[in-house]
Amino acid sequence: MGATNCPETPRQKMIGMMYLVYLALLALNVSAMLLNSFVTVSDTMDASSFTIQTKVADTYNKFEQFALTNPDKVGEYYDVAKEVRTYSDELRMFIDSMKYDFIGQLEKKASVDTAGNGDKVTVNFIGSDGKVDINLVRGVVRKVGVGFMQQSSADAAAQNHFLGGGEFNPANEELRSVQIRKKIEEYKAKVSESVKKAGFDSVAFPGLEVEGEEFTLNVHGKNMKGCWERHTFESNIPIADIILLTRITSDVMNAEFDIANNLYKAVNADDFKFDKVAARVVPKSNYIMQGSQFEADIFVAAYDSKAKLKAEVNGAHIESTDTNGSITWTTGSGAEGLHKYQGNVYVKAANGEDVAYPFSGEYTVGKPAAVVSLTNMNIFYVGVENPVSISVPGIPAKDISATISSGTITSQGGGNYSVKLARLEREVTIVVSAKIDGQTRRMGEFKYKTRKIPTPVLKVGNLSSKKVTKDELANAGKLRATFPEDFVFKVPPLTVRQFTIAVGANEKNITGNTINPEAQSIIKQARKGQRVMITDVEVRLPDGRSETLESAFRIK
């Protein structure tokens, strides 16, 4: 810092050193600012890519709707669009895999706040097999961005990863940069070939130019010609390569969006001309009751919402009262039986003349009727749920209701009902009503007999024979009261609270429903051929009655 003939003092040397440190600190600060800018750009591009992807999806959704409307016209273009989507998805997945594999190999692990609560956790990107878990890297990057990276400025690592060590050889297909270039070339070739089916001679791929060796390289301050791989990946820091790969996926989405839009426009939604106009009749119901009205919508397949439609039905002239391209025709039901109708609907042509389009149809008028059927048999049992189905022809189940003269009748939905009687009656009456044209009408009444539920049968364990050994009876288990097998109604389980067991003069009152040690001691006293009596088995039935059951077994 001082002149050669004037040696520096220690103070001057210290000031000089401090100046150098200051410059270095300034340089480091600029570097950190630049890296932060790279991170911001990367996160912004990721957000932009998501926006583009949403627009592409919206275009495909509109395309799909057109394809459903007119498959003959739109189908070919939509098929090509789906092929382009498949090719684009494949290339994006490949580029993304390259990017996340690069981050995983570079960082190996990361300490990030994935939960967003301020707590950082360590995430290992390399699995036990030594390979990068690409999905794990993708998840972290999409959650927190690339700001967690510690090696974002390690330029040598980036260049070696994509260009390989030593002199670059563009013919080496093992190099990642070469693989990326070839994938882009294949994508462009496939897409170009696909769009030819839709009549496109060529298609542009902005940002995806990789062919030739005319790319300018700035090597040591001199502009030189080189290949796409060196132009893209040489002398870059890792964060810059990540941005480049993100940019490639964005360029793919932009190309896909342009192609899909051009295919969509080629269909030309305004070109859907009406080559046929046919009358349509949609009746509210083809089956109506006497006293009600028949109602049907008459419309044409193509219409002008600003024009009023005119029609003639069985000699009566009517006009549309709305702008939905239809006419509502109402007529009385008339007598029971088949009724036919015919007429014309008129559409105004370009020359101002009304063009008639004929139509015809028929409907049936029936007498009010209802159908009630008991699911199991033609009687109602007291105290249990009796399933019943009720219907009225031509009337939906939700518009049908029913009442009963005794007990309750409850709708189970779909025309199914449950009847429960609290007491025995000589007969009960079910009245069925239906809502027709906004009014509730009585459709009929039905009378049914009632009956007590049958007396249950006493069963001891699983014994099926009345001739048993002492061991079989002693180990039979529990006493059960069940109904005969032909009684198919659902009945709550019957409870046996106590019983009496006797062998000759020896008897014992047992609490509960189990052949316990006390009962077993009585059974063991029985001799061969002697009878074991089980009596005083009282059970309460669902209809309120009590029944006393008994059973006898002979020891063999």
Image (tube, helix red, strand yellow):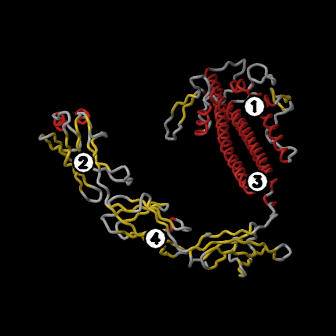
Q: CA distance from mark 1 to mark 4?
A: 75 Å
Q: Residues within 10 Å of mark 1 (few under 14, many from 20)?
A: many
Q: Residues within 10 Å of mark 2 (few under 14, many from 20)?
A: many
Residue nearer the viewer, 175 or 552: 552
Asked if residue 389 is positioned above or below residue 108 in the image, the reply reads below
Marking on residue 71: 3
Task: Read off the residue under disc 2.
Answer: 496
Q: CA distance from mark 3 to mark 1?
A: 37 Å
- Is there a contact, CB below 8 Å, between mark 3 and mark 2? no
Image coordinates of residue 541 in percent, x first then y, are 28, 55
Looking at the rendering, which quadrant does residue 12 occupy?
A: top right
Position of the C terminus, as image quadrant, is top left
Kindly tell me whether residue 346 is visible in this rendering: yes
Q: CA distance from mark 4 to mark 3?
A: 48 Å
- Is there a contact, CB below 8 Å, between mark 4 and mark 2? no
Position of the N terminus, as image quadrant, is top right
Please report whichever mark, 4 or 2, sits nearer to the chain's N-terminal start: 4
Task: Read off the residue under disc 1.
Answer: 180
Element assignment for label 4: strand
Please report whichever mark, 1 or 4, sits nearer to the chain's N-terminal start: 1
In the picture as drawn, the residue positioned furthest to the front comes out as 529
Q: Is residue 13 left or right of residue 479?
A: right
Task: Read off the residue under disc 4.
Answer: 432
